[in-house]
Image (tube, coloured by chain):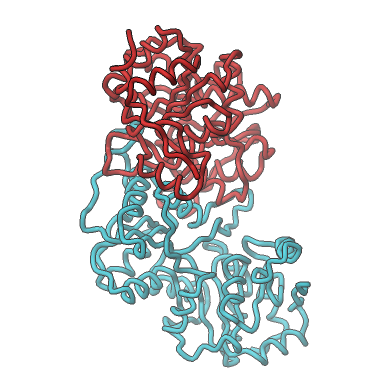
Chain colours: A cyan, B red
Amino acid sequence: MISFPVNLDDSKECAKLLDEIDFVVVDCDGVLWLNMSLLPGCDRTINVLRKNGKKIIFATNNSSKSRQEMLKKLNDMGFNATIDEVMITSFALCVYLKQMNFSGKVYIFGNVNGGTRGIADELTAAGIECTGVGKDPMANDGDMFPNVTLDCDVKAVVVAYDNYISLPKLVKACTYARTVDPRFFIATNADESFPTPMKHLLIPGTGAFVAFVETASGRKPVTLGKPGTFFFECLKAIAPDINPQKTVMIGDRLNSDIAFGNNNGFRYTIHVQTGVDSLNDVKECIERGEKHLVPSHYINSIADLNKFIDG
Amino acid sequence: MISFPVNLDDSKECAKLLDEIDFVVVDCDGVLWLNMSLLPGCDRTINVLRKNGKKIIFATNNSSKSRQEMLKKLNDMGFNATIDEVMITSFALCVYLKQMNFSGKVYIFGNVNGGTRGIADELTAAGIECTGVGKDPMANDGDMFPNVTLDCDVKAVVVAYDNYISLPKLVKACTYARTVDPRFFIATNADESFPTPMKHLLIPGTGAFVAFVETASGRKPVTLGKPGTFFFECLKAIAPDINPQKTVMIGDRLNSDIAFGNNNGFRYTIHVQTGVDSLNDVKECIERGEKHLVPSHYINSIADLNKFIDG
């Protein structure tokens, strides 16, 4: 029998939880903001927790920015963050490639976001050569099959969210995924969809792009983001003293954020209702007996904690 | 113990097989041609079989053409085909929608091929309204998420091979796939990759596009093409006297063509080496005990039969 999560919108429950934790690992999209819109009051929650001595880590599966650019977004949104608080999968990719002693060029199936080049900027800063970011239209418009040119220096392919998806890019990603060393067919994350303010639309997540390349190539990628354990290795790289028994994970996705907390033995996991999954999804996980997807606590928005925390 | 398939490149074996069958169901891409290139001699094989009294059915999972356009391609390539010999998934889609008494508009995630509009033409000919074919670029270039406009008349979505793939089209396909009656989230086929003459490239098949929409929407489509039994219903619609015990299936894909023959109790299945799967893939299926994927016979190309059949 799996217990239903505790409602954290209660001063006693909140005080108890905060008393027992030192580390707050918080997802971004769907928890702190939706695309470019701050979820009101969330900046205060995080800033007050930090002021009260909690160590904050912003941990996102998103790879659309470099670590520096994510810091800028956090600061612009009102979070008094510092660079050592930021963990993003574009940076996790560098940690992974360095750890595997990678040499060669990386083909990036990934996005350009208002002038920023996310993964490409992060790889370049780490001294790793890369290619692929941006538009790549068909040479002969209307071709059934694009006859693309491959780059023989490419020894790794990373699949992320790509707003310039096109058939030539997909052919490249699939061909590289089939030919590179299997350790270097990499997915930033497996999130199936994206939390956005446009509720009537289903915005596909990186997991959908990954499923495409996986199906065509017949190969499984190494996946870097939550809920995997490698992402916890990355957190330890920036917060060596992190202790799961004194850590809470806050997120909107059950199979990503909550599973990450549970898979890594975090003391608490808090589910918020401001992103992809709802409290009804939690109920369904309980009914299906999927314990690793069930949070210890839930609350509508982390901004609801503001009434219980002094600052 | 699964038997290794019999080599059909042998006059006695060939005579025995031809003696026992009345119907030849033959795949097209990878068996008769690669993209626009005829596999030499295959036209003669099929034409002579027809002359010898065998009933031919060209049965393709491809949906890039209407039935009439596929007939034109067959004729242009030298196959003396007639319209009642052609079964293509764009036509199977119409059979399916009529059978389900569908009313409403169909959103097509599918291709435009040198001026032909495949599924759209077939649906229009059948009196079914549709939308979606062609280009659909992002309104604001560089947006992370396209804010697309939905068509509230859309009550079905079909996912096929699309050479104009773009993020707005994918958002529409995923959103419709989540909202329409589950019977009307339709995939033309599940082929993972495409046989082409460009051997150094991996060209993703419709199955990869389907995996994308399936992952984002969390829904499974109704799949029309081989290896499913509905496709055999379609064959019966154009050849009511087809008798599986007197039928041979010829194809290059094990999980599509050969599985189709086996799933529907065809007397014989012939695997050719001119398309996606190799004889080594057959060996691996035998080792894994996947009996439904193992053909009764194999041959390099059906043109190799020319030396055994009179015409």
| Percent of width and height locating residue B48 | 36, 11
Q: Quadrant of residue A262?
A: bottom right
- Above or below, A198 relative to A44: above
Horizontal side of residue B25 vs A91, given as left or right? right
Tell me if I can see residue B206 in this picture: no
| Percent of width and height locating residue B202 | 34, 44
* Closest to the observer, A146 or B286: B286
Horizontal side of residue A154 vs A282, given as left or right? left
Q: Quadrant of the C terminus of chain B?
A: top left
| Percent of width and height locating residue B286 | 45, 45
Tell me if I can see residue B8 in this picture: yes
Q: Hey, which residue is sitting farthest left in the picture?
A: A152
| Percent of width and height locating residue B88 | 49, 23
At horizontal 41% and vertical 22% (from top left) the residue drawn is B116
At horizontal 49% and vertical 42% (from top left) the residue drawn is B2
At horizontal 42% and vertical 59% (from top left) the residue drawn is A160
At horizontal 56% and vertical 64% (from top left) the residue drawn is A37
- Above or below, A29 relative to B49: below
- Above or below, A276 relative to A233: above
- Above or below, A203 relative to A272: above
Total numbered labels: 0
* Closest to the observer, A126 or A154: A154
